Amino acid sequence: MQTISRRDLLRASAAIVVGFSLGKRAAAQGAGKTVDPGQLDSFLAIHRDGTVTVYTSLVDVGTGMLIAIPQMAAEELGIPVERISVVEGDTALTANTGGTGGSTGLTRGGVEIRQAAATARRALDKLGPNANLGELMGDRQFNLRSDPNAPLKNPANYTIVGKPLPRPDIPGKCTGTTVYLQDHTVPGMLHARVVRPPAFGAKLLTVDEASIKSIPDARVVRSGNFLAVTAKDEWAAIRAARDLKATWSEWKGLPGSDNLDQNIRKTPLDKDQTLVSRGDAAQALPKTAKQLKASYWWPFQSHASLAPCCAIADVRDDGTTIWSSTQGTHALRNNLTKLFGLPAGKTRVIFLPGAGSYGGNGNDDVAADAVLISKMVHAPVRVQWMRADEHGWDPKGPAQALDVHAGLDADGRIVAWDTQMWVPTNIPGTRAFIAADLAGIEQEHGQSPGGVINNADPPYNVPHVTVTAHWVKTSPLKVSNLRAPGRIGNAFAVESFTDELAAAAGADPVAFRLRGLTDPRAIAVIERAAQMIGWQPRPSPNPTPGVGRGIAYVRYNQALNYIAVAIEVAVDRGSGKLAIRRVACAHDSGLVVNPDALRNQVEGCIMQTLSRTLHEEVKFDQSHVTTVDWARYPLLTFPEVPAVEVALLNHPELPILGAGEGATAPVAAALGNAIFDATGIRLRRAPFGTTIKA
Amino acid sequence: MPKYNFQVNGKPVSVESWDPAQPLLYVLRNTLGLHAAKFGCGLGQCGACTVLVDGKPARSCVSTVSQAAGRRITTLEGLGTPEKPDAVQAAFIAEQAAQCGYCTNGMIMAAKGLLTQTPNPTGEQVKQYLAGNLCRCGTHARILSAVERAAKTQHEAKA
């Protein structure tokens, strides 16, 4: 990695902050701007002063896109990166080329801006040799189609892409000048808080409005079972929500989270689906020399955003404006328009940064809360959930049960493998908004846990493989995409079980994996991660117990980035206390646009997944989620944080593969494998906790 | 309405609050327009709302406006600006120690408290001191590097 001095960082940051404010000015002037996804002008505007604004429907959720996308655009345009600013997510200013998710910020968002910049460069070159873009274009429109075949700069000549330039958003975040959605205000805005039922299906029986009459300007807002309070003052709204006396019917419609792994196998199925069928595993398995079977379990988990979700809505006769941190502003706009019968074309969703959302957290739901309340009180309304609303009501990453069965030949090679998984089925349609269900507004009840079936087969040369999804009809909790949906649980099962097979074969876990691989990029990440952790070849468990190392390898979605994670742990032989000492990750996501921003993402993937693996489990009784604060839904804390080392295997000549999720996938298995090496104890259920006992 | 007098970022302020139990957080954010301190849980569990009260880190979501009376409050805005960040802020910027940045206020304010009390902390001391500050994005390693860098630069500045 290139090194840069602190002074360089600060100077570059300041320059890009200037670019930012110009971007805001461009946004304010943007009325009437084209948002046709085929038009170059939808993605890029060159201003009289030589600055450039790029427009994307994908948003930066702390992921570094606000520097990486300008780097890609600047490279093609041949201008300094600090002249480029980004308008993200605003439905009135950006073409709808999809929301943010699935690690597509650069592979989709960045690539389309790069192509627009290349199209613009070719058009500008035809205008003449004048290097001053501002003079050439001066806020004029190109009126051109963005050309997917416009020639791109040769990566060998890159001077901006590949540099670890600092992120423009960080100085503001470190000095309190960034305006988050939570900090935004609108004239005449009321503060609102929702009062959710004590049980998911409870009906609102009575509301005692007098119970909050001493609180200044507090007002009850009710529609069916939807209950909220508003006030001019935020603390008054919070107090009113807390003090409001209401009675609700009893409801006990949940199965409870105890024995969920057994219950999920008994839930009626929508269908079975064969996902992978290679060779004939059913026939081959019984004939193998040695067979192993195991069951793995991944629990329901919450997005657990550090900020409870927030939205501001201003519903007026002449149009509606919604300020949101959703990862999909256009989809939210379309869904809310349909749900509330808002006039098409007169509803705008403006993105403002919030706390990390990691997929479909409660951001869309809180926007519906805000629209419903604003409609009823005829004023702009800011709704922020309280902590219990967030943990209790955000849609969850689904629980997953996996049964794996495999056989080794006499030579210790995996010859047959079978994975059976139980996951919530996909139901077409929009995920139901909480507000609409409570208020009795008719809506779709779609269900999509995200691409939860990926990475459920071994990434090795195994001749006979089947993977079957048992699509479970219903889920006790509402589900949505939570970072790397399903892949963490699937890779936990597959890569832990691979380790079990290696141990059964008496093989070194690294050598066992390499034996089944031919792809040089896969081999490269495994060898690198092993080297970084100081891997000593031998079978697990460690003949000297108490210290152990484990490795896991994933090719994300079987077709994207290559990641190997190696972890070293110590487990106290008396107390069973676990200490994660070191994590090493080798990461190949093709072309690296900004190595430092990428490292930040990869480190985040690792730490967040350590948290999910060690601690996180949503629990519920028959009425509601019970893990509704940070004491009952703990996250990784600093004393548990290991040293982390990331190696980026850059391939400038190859496509970008995305990095927002990939490095999450091997972490749980690598940790479980390290614990097995240290103790001989195989963990097959997350969360592990931090005390390892047989 | 009752009035409360205290100092914020070196300047005296006088604020009204209808409720003496109103947390300081909302007074800072809504009455005084200082929005660096963030609402994360309202329970004192996450640290996003941290400010310095008489130089020591405190959770403004569970400190009341009446408790603030007569005290010196420092918020993240009071440390420095993007153009002129203080040593801890500059260290966080140099280490690029943020993802979403929602916890960053608390991390910097806690670090400030630690370095005032213990100018040369060990790595373990930093981890223990920040044990009550949560980060969801997983920026922990960079935050630790930033605190280490800040300690070093503060030390060098004094030398």
Image (tube, coloured by chain):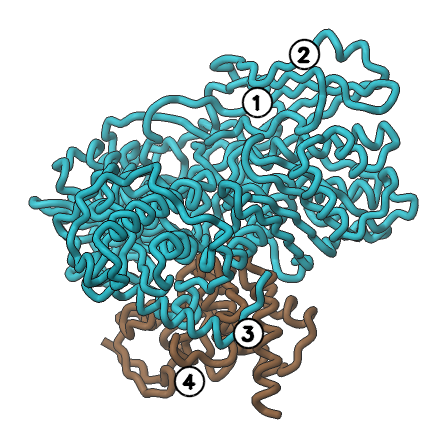
User: The numbered mark 4 sits on a residue in which chain?
Assistant: B
- Residue of label 3: B111
Image colour for chain A is cyan
- Residue of label 1: A422
- Residue, far top: A283
**SS of the residue at dot 3?**
helix
Amino acid of disc 4: Arg
Quadrant where the N terminus of chain A is found in the figure: bottom right
In whole angstroms, how far apart are the C-alphas of marks 3 and 4? 18 Å
Q: Sequence-wise, which precedes: disc 3 or disc 4?
A: 4
In whole angstroms, how far apart are the C-alphas of marks 1 and 4? 57 Å
User: The numbered mark 3 sits on a residue in which chain?
Assistant: B
Instruction: Report the mark closest to the observer, 2 or 4.
Output: 2
- Residue of label 4: B72
- Residue of label 2: A279
- Residue, far bottom: B159
